[in-house]
Amino acid sequence: MTHQEIYQLAKEWTYEAGEILRKAVTEQLTVEYKTSAADLVTEKDKEIERFFANKINQVFPTHFLLGEEGVQKDQAYQPEEETVWIVDPIDGTTNFVHTKANFSISVAVYVKGEPVIGIIYDVIKDEMFHVLVGAGLYINDRPAETALAEREIEEALICINHLWLAPNPYINEIKMQKMVGDIRGFRCIGSAALELAYVATGRMDGAIFNGLGPWDYAAGYVMLKEQGLVCTTTAGDVINPYQHSPILAASQALHTKILNDYIELKN
Ligand code: IPD
Ligand code: CA
Ligand code: CA
């Protein structure tokens, strides 16, 4: 199958999965803690990941799945040599449980280490961000703008989590506090994937995260790359798409400014 055909199927399956989640928000959910009370998982997270696993295994038995819930975590493979689907079945589970909006399904396909497909679906808004590398980024049926505004720091809206403004083990909070004082505003939507899609489409100007899983950023990374935006670790290094990573995404000028003036990593 061509990449275009895989892309079409991936979108169809994501819409189907979205339908399941739209129904689920009206039903009683079973919520469990993963590592803490701030780290939730529901039976729907697992069901949606299983849904993708079944589809992929049926249609693409030679492809692999790297999913947050690890429904196929026992597969042994070299990701750089294979076709890998990187899936977050619900990104923003806390929103899914509490506010019942602002959560997404994130699906990426990487072929031999190269980003090829990125899909981020805001289920409640029925808004799908999607890209096949080289064919442009779309919001539903509409091509996303490509000439995004290059904003100065004082005009910028940046996605960051409140945790990085308070004492924390990763990043100098004093410099982060200075940054939020200098910019126009900061936002935390609560779905890292959606936040990256927003940067890729110019709704936000940048995003900073300290510890994302591949499923959180893989699809967003494809979109940012397609748009000519920069996405690195918070040290400015190239990302390994199959590993947990801190992430800094922005336009080239803003990325350099944030990296130089506001990010100091703790070690
Ligand atoms: C989380 C969300 C959240 C981000 C966390 C992620 P989950 O994903 O993307 O916005 O701050 O780091 O783990 O657990 O809801 O899939
Ligand atoms: Ca996630
Ligand atoms: Ca998740």
Image (cartoon, grey):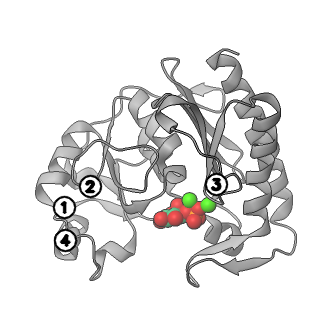
Point out residue 114 in the picture as x, y percentages from the top left corner: 45, 28
Mark 2 vs mark 1, CA separation in Å: 7 Å
Q: Are marks 3 and 4 in contact (CB under 8 Å)?
A: no
Q: On the image, which quarter does residue 186 sit in? A: bottom left
140 or 4, which is in the foreground? 4
Badge 2 crowding class, 10 Å Cα cut-off, few under 14, some 14 to 19, many 20 or more, is many
Which is in the foreground here, disc 3 or disc 1?
3
Mark 4 highlights which residue?
266
Amino acid type at image mark 2 = Thr
Which is in the foreground here, disc 3 or disc 4?
3
Which is in the foreground here, disc 2 or disc 1?
2
Q: Which image quarter holds the N terminus?
A: top right
Mark 1 highlights which residue?
263
Mark 3 vs mark 1, CA separation in Å: 34 Å
Residue 73 numbered mark, or none: 3
Q: What SS does tag 1 mark?
A: loop
66 or 126, which is in the foreground? 66
Mark 3 vs mark 4, CA separation in Å: 31 Å
**What residue sits 25% from the left and 43% below the top?**
151
Mark 2 vs mark 3, CA separation in Å: 27 Å
Q: Are marks 2 and 1 in contact (CB under 8 Å)?
A: yes
Sequence-earlier tag: 3 or 1: 3
Residue 234 numbered mark, or none: 2
